[in-house]
Image (cartoon, coloured by chain):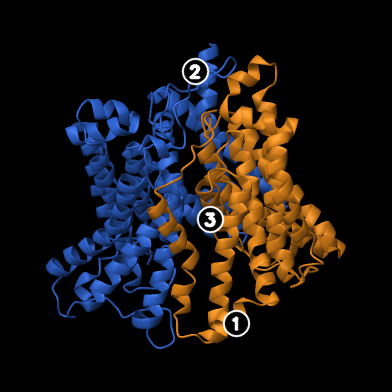
Chain colours: A orange, B blue
Amino acid sequence: MSSVLGMIFTLGFATQVLRIAVPYALAAMGGAVTERSGVVDLALEAKLLFGAFTAAAVGHATGSAYLGVLGGMAAGLLVAAVQIGCSLWLGADQVIVGVALNVLALGGTRFLLQLLFGEGANSPPSPSFGSSVVGNPIVWLTIVATIAVPFALRRTRWGVRLRAAGDRPDALVAVGVSPLRARLAAGLVGGALAGAGGAQLSLAVGGFSADMSSGRGYIALAMVILSGWRPAWAVLACLGVAFAESLNILFQVTNVEISHELAALLPYLTTLAVLVIAGGARRPPPRSLGQV
Amino acid sequence: MTGVDRTAPPSGGAAGPGHTPVVDAPPGASLGSRLAHRFRATGARRELQAALIALLASIAIGSLLMLIAGKAPGHIWWAMITRTASDPYSLGQVLYKATALVLTGLSVSIALDAGLFNIGAEGQLTAGVLGCAMVGAALPPATPAVIAIPICVLAAAAAGALVGGLIGVLRVTRGAHEVITSIMLNAIVSGFALYLGNRVIFRGGTTRGGAIADGAQLPQLGFGGSSANAAILIAILAAAAVWWLRAQTTWGQAWRAVGESPAAARTTGTSVGRVQIVVMIGSGALAGLAACNFVMGHKHAFEEGLGRGTGILGISAALLGRMHPIGIVVAALVIGFLQAGGLAVADLVPKELTEMLLGVVVLAVAAAGPYVRRAEARA
């Protein structure tokens, strides 16, 4: 056990936690931005999945991982545009739109795999950032976003308007700003962030595989709610999830006598325990969340 | 509990000018109550109109996808319908898939009726599979069917009810949001099933456990050797029971009142917390019952990943069916048809196309309802 403790306090372990946290953190920040504007964001899973696929496909086609990142962000943006179009423009329920988009993403990415590459489960190899942290632009994006998103929410016109759209849309209407436009501006940024998170999933391993997001979008949403819709706190919660995941990998490598199936449940059990002890979210959600 | 509702009461009216809500959910309604409002059937003509628009939109988008794949849409649609309808095996598969979807759809719908969004049918179903298969395998091989079948059915329901009830208890006593707890429990149950599988259940390097007692196996319905089985009776009975409870009993009234407005229900003397816990137990039991279809009707053993995805698709079935038991049965058949029909034309288009179409259908149905309501409001 002492050897495990020694291995936790290493640079390698810290960078691993960071790498694993990136998709969660970007998705959670995207979700926080979208939800603060009043739109329920169950489609995070779809944004991660389409982001991961597009990043790998663009990376494979152009040979550039950097273009892959941009592709992933564009895919997340596109999913957000469909989400907002269906729920705010057509008036479909936001929760259903989210669930439907997740179903669509699962089938859609596999359809595209089949169509573009004639493969059922895996894309051809794409360039990869590997285990590098310093050379990975998505890690830098995460760090910058962790600082910039809370600041922008608090201080910029974009942030003030989107928070108003989430809390007091009537006040926004009164000053002549369309809440719909504020929500679109929020949702697109949120989608691009989540799409970048998806890009990390595929570009870290150099290729896309079907269902590679495997529920991370749902976990990220849980962290958003848990953190009371505060992006920086949500990132912290995601680091906790990543820490638990890395610990599990460490246990397997060091042959600690613990079942890896149960150790893999650490993030979920921890979240559940936090919920039971803290008793739900302390902070109220945005007032008009899901009501538009 | 109002403190954990995702939609706190708007002070001064959140719906400003130009933001007339499409539905008349009371202010401060929880996420679940809003859904309850929006998806409860409101009038046969309007519902049919919406369904027709959704169907046409889905066919249009599906045809577009086929064109992208370089195929003639008319030919594919025709082949999908004729091949599924003329082939007993495909028809049987539609029934097999629909059986489980009816049960998970009912599970999601009764929770929504009470204002709770149960995403956890997936985990509750997995718990059911685990419970049903373990109890079935533990029975003496010579157990007669009259004893074995009820025991296994009860085991499936009880295992699902345990997980569903836990979500309800955490929500009521600790204020833990049911969407988060059910997502977490989905992961926890499936991980726990894998753990138990690797430690105790799986036989000789496979991901399959020991077979359940012969008496616990449900008879097949034939249909060209398809997996359709007698569990379809469980699904029909469950749909009838939910219909009866909802429409004919004071119990159903109480649970729908809680979904409409917990505050109003409280003033009339309903114990909101107790209703929510009982409904979540029932919701979990229904999802767990879907395991009978997979374990007792088809695989006759615990298998890793058995029934996976049926819980999430149950959300689609509940919403497509407008939360009405009869609607859910129809929706389950439609989804089952898309799944089986997709396989029947797998030689013409990738079967992933129909998987994708499933999402499109749900999206179209969700958008068509408000569209019809708006068109009516204009007229």
Query: Which chain letter goes with mark 3?
Result: A
Mark 3 sits on what residue? A219
- The one nearer the camera, B10 or B19, is B10
Q: Amino acid at mark 3?
A: Ile
Quarter occupied by residue A83: top right
Mark 2 sits on what residue? B12
Q: CA distance from mark 1 to mark 2?
A: 57 Å
Q: CA distance from mark 3 to mark 1?
A: 29 Å
Please tell me if label 3 and label 1 are on a single chain: yes
- Asked whether, in this view, residue A128 is left or right of residue A176, the answer is right
Q: Residue B323, image x and y in percent?
A: 37, 37
User: Which tag, 3 or 1, sits closer to the chain's start?
Assistant: 1
Are the residues tagged 3 and 1 within 8 Å (C-beta)? no
Q: Residues within 10 Å of mark 2 (few under 14, many from 20)?
A: few
Determine the secondary structure under disc 1: helix
- Asked whether, in this view, residue A8 is left or right of residue A278, the answer is right
Query: Which chain letter goes with mark 2?
Result: B
User: Disc 1 vs disc 2: which is toward the camera?
Assistant: 1
Q: Amino acid at mark 2?
A: Gly
Q: Relative to residue B29, is residue B280 depicted above or below?
A: below
Q: Relative to residue B308, is residue A262 depicted above or below?
A: below
Residue shown at the point (38%, 23%) measured from the top left: B43
Mark 1 sits on what residue? A6
Residue shown at the point (74%, 60%) measured from the top left: A139
Are the residues tagged 2 and 3 within 8 Å (C-beta)? no
